[in-house]
Image: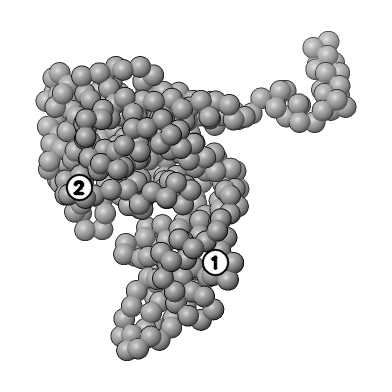
Amino acid sequence: MKTNLLFLLVLSFCLVINKTTLIAGVLQQKPFVVVLDAGHGGHDTGNRGNGYIEKDIVLDVTLQVGKILENTPGFEVVYTRKTDVFVILEERAPIANKIDADIFVSIHCDAFTRTGAYGAGTFVMGLNKSGKNLSTAKKENEVIFLEENYEERYAGFDPNSPESLIGLTILQQEYLDQSIMLAGLIQNNMVNKLGRNDRSVRQDVFWVLHHSYMPSVLIEMGFLTNKAEGAYINSSKGRKEMSREIANGIIAYKKSISLATSDAQNPTITEEEIKEAIKTSEEKNFKGIDFRVQLAASSKKLDEKPYNFKGLKGVDREKEGALYKYYYGKTSDYNEIQLMKTFAQEKGYTSAYVVAFKGEKKVKLSDVLKNQDN
């Protein structure tokens, strides 16, 4: 009885003094737990394009991202590694599972298999529609060959076999929508705020993601094998800027899911919530310009009904020459249209892209972005 009375007195005092302090201090809401995974480490250097060392770059960026989040109220950060040590792939995701983390983010640098490739990309777990384009996943998965007893540990898994990779996709399907939203927010920051070439949000099959029981993404910050991009990513300025925008994407994601359903274990992310997520990020408005996502061009005239467009609402049809062109979304906010493009791609329009209009006239997107003052 004395304990209950004391609690009521303390509670009343807190209500009078500061409602915010009561919420943060007495109720002690669960922090948003982020597991940051710096790829490679130890005797696994990662790629060494132009002489740069991937394991060192991603560790530095990961620690900088973590510091930003640790200084942001409501976050708790756990690292798979904080030093130059080798952590086997099989152990990385279970670190997140053991502590019931909210998200898992793995950070890497890319290396081109074709001359001239450059740009930032983010990946979620899953096969693309054709089952092809597994080159990035193969490269990141091949680190298992550096581990002792990998034959027994990975039970016949072959990073070069599409059949092996397909079997890894099932578990992460439950979190695909949330993973795509997280990846989209990070990707948009790297592209729109840092001017990185957009290699988009894509699905691929990564061992490091497949055992995670939460939304998970893998970031390829850019290509060390590209002379200009490698120098940027390796520079202190580049690392700082990439760290900031990755962290900001994570922060925006946390804000966005607070708008979702009360089922915190597995909220269903809707088109409306994706739009709401934009409000948590800095707007990038272009006055007098309307951005739209072009889904398709066809000689066939379709009714603008959701059932004709994989469930997408608000699709418009316009006649241009002999073709009908179908557009999704209409906004002056470039960040918003980028997320809508990601949403359309996940619905199945993998070749969807952003176009710009000034009034009724289509204008060149690159000119709009280049000439915009802000």
Disc 2 crowd, CA 10 A, few/some/many (<14, 14-19, 20+): some
Name the residue located 73 percent from the left edge and 29 percent from the top edge.
23
Q: Which residue is mark 2?
A: 134
- Taking the image as shown, residue 100 lies to the left or right of residue 7, namely left
Q: Give the amino acid type for the residue marked by disc 1 in the picture.
A: Thr
- Farthest residue in the top direction? 2
Q: Position of residue 205 (x, y in %)?
A: 25, 43
- Taking the image as shown, residue 187 lies to the left or right of residue 117, namely right
- Residue 166 - label: none
Q: Which residue is mark 1?
A: 331
Name the residue located 46 percent from the left edge and 56 percent from the top edge.
339
Image quarter (top left, top right, bottom left or bottom right) of the C terminus: bottom right
- Relative to 138, is 91 above or below? above
Q: CA distance from mark 2 to mark 1?
A: 34 Å
Q: Position of residue 305 (x, y in %)?
A: 45, 77
Q: Is residue 205 something one can see in this rendering?
A: no
Q: Nearer the viewer, residue 244 or 72?
A: 244
Q: Nearer the viewer, residue 161 or 81?
A: 81
Q: Secondary structure at mark 1?
A: strand
Disc 1 crowd, CA 10 A, few/some/many (<14, 14-19, 20+): some
Image quarter (top left, top right, bottom left or bottom right) of the N terminus: top right
Q: Position of residue 291 (x, y in %)?
A: 49, 68
Q: Position of residue 245 (x, y in %)?
A: 48, 40
Q: Give the amino acid type for the residue marked by disc 2 in the picture.
A: Leu
Q: Nearer the viewer, residue 18 or 200?
A: 200
- Taking the image as shown, residue 77 lies to the left or right of residue 110, namely right
Name the residue located 34 percent from the left edge and 29 percent from the top edge.
58
Residue depth check, mark 2 versus mark 1: number of the one nearer the observer: 1
